[in-house]
Amino acid sequence: MKASKLKAYIIFILAALLVGGLAGALVGDSMAEYDAMGKPALSPPAYVFPVAWTLLYVLMGAGAAMVYNSGAPDRWRALTLYVLQLAANFLWPLIFFGLGARSWAFAWLLLLFALVLAMALSFWKISRKAALLQIPYLAWLLFAGYLNLATLLIDR
């Protein structure tokens, strides 16, 4: 792999990890809050979340790097969707944990899912591998939606 292509992978993956890390830092000890919530069946232990999100950020960054490295003329549209979904992803924990607004967080999660789906479809036109890397992210967002909605309903 050429150094310039490898550099794109490093930049996109690190940027995604930094966005996730910053969101996590801003909500502080949110896992203690999560542990105190009424949770539905299938709710994983708190330690699963940082592991899952780290993997997802690596996959989304790698997919974005593939699209960037493709040189495709429409890559900028796909990468714009990537940046928009990353921004929406950054804001979700601030809404859910920081503001404690679970209803708004669920609505925001629906927006995030739509953005990631649009991004994955846009990636598909450029690099099928890049799009396929987003499947775990979409699946996790569906699971996160279940958890978000369930915690909202349980604590009513």
Image (cartoon, helix red, strand yellow):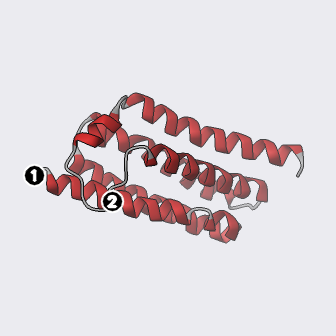
In the foreground, 27 or 39: 39
The amino acid marked with disc number 2 is Gly
As drawn, 137 above or below 53: below
Q: Quadrant of residue 125?
A: bottom right
Q: Is residue 79 left or right of residue 85?
A: right
Q: Distance from label 2 to label 1 (Cα)?
A: 17 Å
The residue that appears at 27% across and 37% down in the rendered structure is: 33
Q: Quadrant of residue 123?
A: bottom right
> Which mark is first along the chain, 1 or 2?
2
Looking at the image, which residue sits at the far left? 156
Q: Position of residue 39 (x, y in %)?
A: 24, 53
As drawn, 156 above or below 30: below
Q: Is residue 35 left or right of residue 61?
A: left
The residue that appears at 50% across and 39% down in the rendered structure is: 20
The amino acid marked with disc number 1 is Arg
Q: Residues within 10 Å of mark 2 (few under 14, many from 20)?
A: some
The residue that appears at 33% across and 59% down in the rendered structure is: 145
Q: Secondary structure at mark 2?
A: helix
The residue beneath circle 1 is 156
Q: Secondary structure at mark 1?
A: loop
As drawn, 126 above or below 97: below
Q: Residues within 10 Å of mark 1 (few under 14, many from 20)?
A: few
Q: Which mark is residue 145?
A: 2
